[in-house]
Amino acid sequence: MRKLRFIVIIQLILLVVLIALTINSQAANPGDSDKKKGKSLSKGALKLYPNPVPMGEEFKIEYTLEEETELYVIVNDQEGDISFFFTETFGPGTNNIIFNTAGMEAGKYTLSINADKKSEKVKLEITD
């Protein structure tokens, strides 16, 4: 349990750093963010399956991008605590991420993909 808390704390620190870097980048280049505003993540483009997913098994996140975009993928538990997150740049078109639930407890989660000023969310359930 102590190791899990440490991992969550590190993830939160990394998220704060990423947000700060993004804000600083947008402040330094305000015209760049206006060019891409709302064009990256297609509305309704996020799919997750299988759902529910058995604990310790994998699920697939599928989404469509209109252009190369840096995405923030965040999984929150029912209390809103971050269970997992990462950021990566993906190309235009349909993209897939395979996610393993090993180490996650059974329960309901919210998976969010954030790009520029758009966000897509989907409910995720992990079963025993």
Image: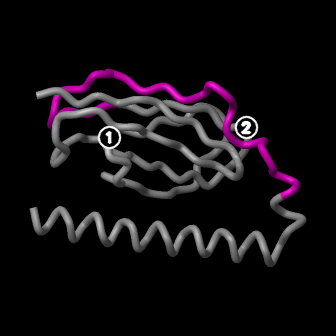
Residue 40 belongs to magenta span: yes
User: Between tags 1 and 2, which lies in front?
Assistant: 1
Picture quarter containing residue 46? Answer: top right
| Mark sitting on residue 66 | 2
**Magenta highlight range:** 34-59
Q: Residue at x 17, y 62 (%)?
A: 4
Residue 21 belongs to magenta span: no
Q: Residue at x 87, y 54 (%)?
A: 35
Q: Is residue 37 left or right of residue 25?
A: right
Other residues around mark 2 within 10 Å, as few (<14) / some (14–19) / many (≥20): few
Residue 94, given in percent of the width and then of the height, sits at 59, 31
Distance of label 1 from label 2 (alpha carbons)? 31 Å
Q: Residue at x 25, y 41 (%)?
A: 100
Residue 30, given in percent of the width and then of the height, sits at 85, 68
Q: Is the C terminus in the top left, top right, bottom left or bottom right quadrant?
A: top left
Residue flagged by tag 2: what amino acid is it? Glu
**SS category of the residue bearing label 2:** loop
Give the mark nearest the N terminus, 1 or 2: 2
The residue singled out by tag 1 in the image is 78
